[in-house]
Image: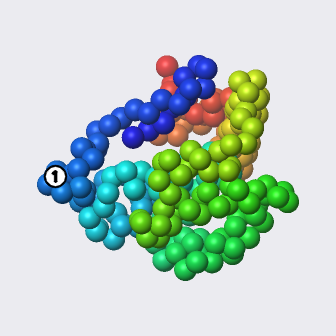
């Protein structure tokens, strides 16, 4: 599934191409298909073990919630070969949060948030919170962002994306300029079936 936002920032879940009935294809309460995106997969899926759909969904929601809050993923994949997830799997959540906290200002991750995410991303399925537990968790009882807050946050994120794109475009332009200068490319020179026109705009265009 994919999560989109409409114009009012309401979450919309789409793309159920791999969705199956909760009791599984064999009707025994377990699923066995290896589907989804690796970085959101619970350990039991990666280990190709039978799994309960609603339990691995809690794990994926934990990953999504972390990304929404921190703006980066908690780990690459939920295996002990992953340096970040290994800390959660070996009950060293304190080090997991210490490492991630280095990327943010002091107290960016509250104790309630850390407890919620740690409980959702447990290695063993039976140790993860249920949806009812999540709804009733202390972190979920705090203040909620207003519509104006959400609009402001997304405007800031859009600005960051635009600035990143502009910086990358400028970098590529400078690298192309440097390459052309090194190769001695001049206005009017033919490169294959194209001709060099202007360094400051489209450096190579079709000759018409």
Instruction: Name which residue lies at 44% across and 38% down.
Output: 2
- The spot of residue 117 in percent (x, y) is 60, 58
Name the foreground residue: 63 vs 189.
63
Q: Element under label 1?
A: loop
- The spot of residue 119 in percent (x, y) is 56, 62
* Applied colour scheme: rainbow
Instruction: Name which residue lies at 63% across and 34% down.
Output: 203
Question: Against 51, is 197 above or below?
Answer: above
- The spot of residue 121 in percent (x, y) is 52, 62
Report the side of 130 relative to 101 (left or right). Answer: left
Report the side of 61 relative to 33 (left or right). Answer: right
- Determine which residue is flagged by label 1: 27
Name the foreground residue: 164 vs 179.
164
Quadrant of res 189: top right
Name the foreground residue: 60 vs 184.
60
Question: Against 152, is 107 above or below?
Answer: below
Instruction: Name which residue lies at 36% across and 67% down.
Output: 44
The quarter of the rendered structure image containing the N terminus is top left
Report the side of 149 relative to 50 (left or right). Answer: right
- The spot of residue 148 in percent (x, y) is 76, 24
Q: Using the rendered image of the protein, determine whether residue 83 is visible from the camera's viewpoint.
A: no
């Amino acid at each position: 599934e994919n999560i989109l936002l409409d114009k009012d920032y309401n979450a919309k879940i789409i793309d159920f191409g791999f969705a199956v009935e909760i009791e599984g294809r064999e009707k025994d309460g377990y699923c066995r298909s290896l589907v989804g995106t690796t970085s959101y997969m619970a350990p039991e899926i990666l280990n190709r073990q039978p799994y309960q759909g609603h339990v691995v969904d809690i794990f994926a929601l934990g990953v999504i919630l972390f990304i929404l809050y921190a703006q980066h993923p908690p780990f690459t994949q939920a295996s002990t070969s992953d340096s970040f997830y290994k800390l959660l799997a070996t009950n060293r959540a304190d080090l997991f949060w210490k490492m991630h906290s280095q990327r943010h200002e002091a107290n960016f991750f509250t104790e309630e948030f850390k407890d919620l995410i740690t409980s959702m991303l447990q290695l063993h399925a039976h140790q993860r919170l249920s949806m009812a537990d999540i709804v009733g968790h202390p972190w979920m009882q705090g203040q909620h962002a207003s519509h104006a807050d959400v609009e402001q946050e997304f405007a800031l994120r859009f600005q960051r994306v635009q600035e990143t794109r502009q910086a990358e475009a400028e970098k590529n332009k400078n690298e192309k300029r440097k390459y052309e200068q090194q190769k001695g490319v001049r206005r009017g020179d033919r490169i294959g079936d194209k001709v060099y026109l202007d360094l400051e705009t489209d450096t190579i265009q079709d000759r018409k």
